[in-house]
Image: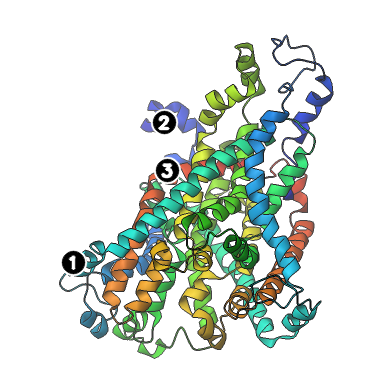
């Protein structure tokens, strides 16, 4: 997530830049004072070979489609032939006044907030508890990460079979005498969104745990040792030393979680499908986009929805960067998994 | 403190860990793992039951172990065709992502040139352009190129979308290689590209493995892109095939569960082989 921080290499490159004009690389380097950093070979051709392919693929298949979405969004277009029916902002007006879209947006907002509130503390607790020498440590880690590694299709199919009204969860509840709790987990609009939240939490909390564990391992032992010598207890150390040092990792995780929740598609589409998702109250902006865009043959409209999703994500990201990640850009502990 | 005496250096580094962790932690870990694995266990065990058992007692264990569901899936041609498609897509995506990403990250971390910051920023901005946003026009683009219903139509966009993360993870690894090493190599007559081939790839191996695994698993599990690009059953990857199987055999729950559990095995094996490497790679990246 380096656009959220200073460019890590900028500082080390600067001195090299002005010192080196005219120093030929092949000259064995009798390092004069101030001569640091890699020398400048005449490197244009190498650069083109090294960066060119990645840049071309990236621009052609990531940047270009997003730009095309912005273009098609102004047209009423069925996806065949050239887009000629220019309708200005009418797609956007329709989207922003469509109650279905509002509903989808509110579902996304719910998932965004509840994921942060629920996954964060759980993952942090688990990571703190596992961040010590345990027997079977790597086995435990692998097992916690299992839901994150298996595909959305497997997760969606497995859970939807389990949660059917005659499925395993209700069966289990009856078996242990809690039959009163058995309910229609998937299609009751009052419950379905919570079901979705539970599945999302189950699927993605392992990622947060792994990220936090990686962050915890980056905290030098000396820091906690010093605190121990000064008489701090375990919880004091976690609260006043480890947690603040984990700040950057937590903030990066939160950012990834927010962006992921705003894009949520696979699980909803697999478990609920296009029609049920809207009646069960689990539609998301992305399912709205596919249902009303591609599946309705309205590629212009679908593109406009994509642009709206992008703008919402961008605004959230910019706010987040401005108000939450601001301090990270200065600090030495800056960084991010991405 | 006998342990501390025999391995003093270790004990000095981590005095806290010479205490045995209390049993409650193991208990807690067990509960967490139970919650994480119960649905997976349901899928795998359900494949060993038959439909009447599942109907009568949906949450029960297999009474007798029926292997027929798994045997049926493992002897079906479509399952193996889909495994092959997923395998080709994942391996090709991973290989290209690693090669292209490493090359670009090398240029971005060890060459100074005008516009470097801009190129780096462009790639990192790619994280803000998730597949969801691009998918509609991407489908049009792939269709224009005539790549629908072909694995190439899935592979190439997957490479493109995996590049930002790959480059962001690899750049710190490559930047961390000491300049002295490069200078020494230069003295020994190794050019920058020679340095790249001989030294950089080996030194950045933890990062390379991390991004490789992430790319492989993402491709193996990919749903949205194949859903748009592949409409022909012969081209289906495993996630699409699994879903199609589930709706085709909606009444045969046991077989669906068997198919589903078989489809998740490769990613699980792949991940557990390299789990340590992933955490190691991320640790490097988190430290920045």
Other residues around mark 2 within 10 Å, as few (<14) / some (14–19) / many (≥20): few
Other residues around mark 3 within 10 Å, as few (<14) / some (14–19) / many (≥20): few
Residue B19 is marked as: 3
Residue tagged by mark 1? B67
Q: Nearer the viewer, residue A265 or B131?
A: B131
Q: Earlier in the sequence, mark 1 or mark 3?
A: 3
x, y percentage for residue A92? 76, 78
Can you tell which of label 1 and label 2 is closer to the viewer? 1
> Quarter of the image holding residue B72?
bottom left
Q: Are marks 2 and 3 in contact (CB under 8 Å)?
A: no
Cα distance between the residues tagged 1 and 2: 52 Å
Residue at 76% from the left image edge and 29% from the top image edge: A13
- Please give the chain letter of the residue carrying mark 3: B
Residue B4 is marked as: 2
x, y percentage for residue A185? 45, 84
In the rendered image, the quadrant that contains the C terminus of chain B is top right
**From this viewpoint, is residue A57 visible?**
yes
x, y percentage for residue B55? 26, 84
Residue at 51% from the left image edge and 52% from the top image edge: A210
Q: Earlier in the sequence, mark 1 or mark 2?
A: 2
Whether A181 is drawn above or below B111: the answer is below
> Quarter of the image holding residue A7?
top right
Q: Nearer the viewer, residue A220 or A262?
A: A262
């Amino acid at each position: 997530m380096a656009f959220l921080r200073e460019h890590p290499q900028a500082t080390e490159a600067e001195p090299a830049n002005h010192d080196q004009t005219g120093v030929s690389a092949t000259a064995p380097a009798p390092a004069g004072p101030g001569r640091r950093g890699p020398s400048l070979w005449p490197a244009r051709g190498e650069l083109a070979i090294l960066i060119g392919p990645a840049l071309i693929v990236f621009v052609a298949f990531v940047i270009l489609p997003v730009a095309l979405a912005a273009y098609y969004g102004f047209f009423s277009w069925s996806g065949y032939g050239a887009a000629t029916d220019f309708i200005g902002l009418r797609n956007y007006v329709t989207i922003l006044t469509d109650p279905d879209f509002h509903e989808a947006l509110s579902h996304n907002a719910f998932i965004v907030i509840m994921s942060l509130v629920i996954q964060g503390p759980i993952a942090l607790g688990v990571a703190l508890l596992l961040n010590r020498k345990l027997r079977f440590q790597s086995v435990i880690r692998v097992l916690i990460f299992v839901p994150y590694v298996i595909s959305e299709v497997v997760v969606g199919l497995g859970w939807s079979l389990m949660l059917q009204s005659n499925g395993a969860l209700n069966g289990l509840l009856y078996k242990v005498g809690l039959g009163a709790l058995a309910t229609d987990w998937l299609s009751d609009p009052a419950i379905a969104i919570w079901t979705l939240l539970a599945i999302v939490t189950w699927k993605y909390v392992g990622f947060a745990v792994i990220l936090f564990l990686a962050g915890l391992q980056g905290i030098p032992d000396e820091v906690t040792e010093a605190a121990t010598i000064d008489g701090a207890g375990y919880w004091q150390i976690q609260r006043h030393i480890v947690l603040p040092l984990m700040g950057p990792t937590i903030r990066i995780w939160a950012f990834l979680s927010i962006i992921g929740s705003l894009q949520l598609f696979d699980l909803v589409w697999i478990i609920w499908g296009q029609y049920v998702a809207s009646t069960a109250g689990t539609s998301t902006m992305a399912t709205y986009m596919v249902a009303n865009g591609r599946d309705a043959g309205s590629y212009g409209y679908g593109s406009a929805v994509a642009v709206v999703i992008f703008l919402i994500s961008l605004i959230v990201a910019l706010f987040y960067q401005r108000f939450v990640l601001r301090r990270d850009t200065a600090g030495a502990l800056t960084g991010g998994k991405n | 403190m006998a342990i501390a005496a025999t391995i003093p250096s270790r004990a000095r580094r981590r005095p806290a860990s010479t205490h045995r962790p209390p049993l409650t932690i193991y208990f807690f870990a067990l509960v967490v793992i139970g919650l994480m694995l119960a649905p997976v266990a349901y899928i795998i065990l359900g494949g060993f039951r038959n439909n009447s058992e599942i109907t009568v007692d949906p949450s029960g264990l297999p009474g007798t172990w029926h292997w027929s569901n798994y045997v049926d899936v493992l002897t079906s041609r479509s399952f193996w065709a889909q495994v092959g498609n997923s395998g080709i897509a994942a391996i090709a995506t991973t290989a290209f992502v690693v090669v292209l990403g490493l090359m670009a990250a090398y240029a971005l971390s060890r060459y100074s040139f005008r516009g470097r910051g801009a190129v780096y920023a462009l790639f990192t901005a790619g994280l803000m352009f998730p597949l969801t946003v691009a998918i509609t026009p991407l489908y049009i683009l792939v269709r224009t190129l005539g790549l629908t219903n072909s694995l190439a139509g899935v592979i190439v966009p997957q490479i493109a979308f995996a590049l930002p993360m790959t480059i962001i993870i690899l750049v710190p690894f490559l930047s961390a290689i000491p300049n002295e090493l490069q200078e020494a190599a230069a003295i020994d007559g190794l050019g920058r590209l020679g340095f790249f081939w001989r030294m950089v790839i080996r030194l950045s191996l933890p990062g390379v493995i991390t991004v490789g695994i992430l790319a492989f698993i993402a491709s193996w599990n990919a749903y949205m892109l194949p859903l748009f690009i592949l409409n022909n059953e012969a081209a289906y990857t495993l996630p699409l095939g699994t879903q199609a199987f589930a709706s085709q055999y909606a009444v045969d729950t046991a077989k669906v569960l068997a198919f589903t559990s078989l489809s998740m095995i490769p990613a699980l094996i792949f991940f557990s082989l390299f789990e340590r490497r992933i955490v190691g790679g991320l640790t490097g990246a988190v430290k920045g």
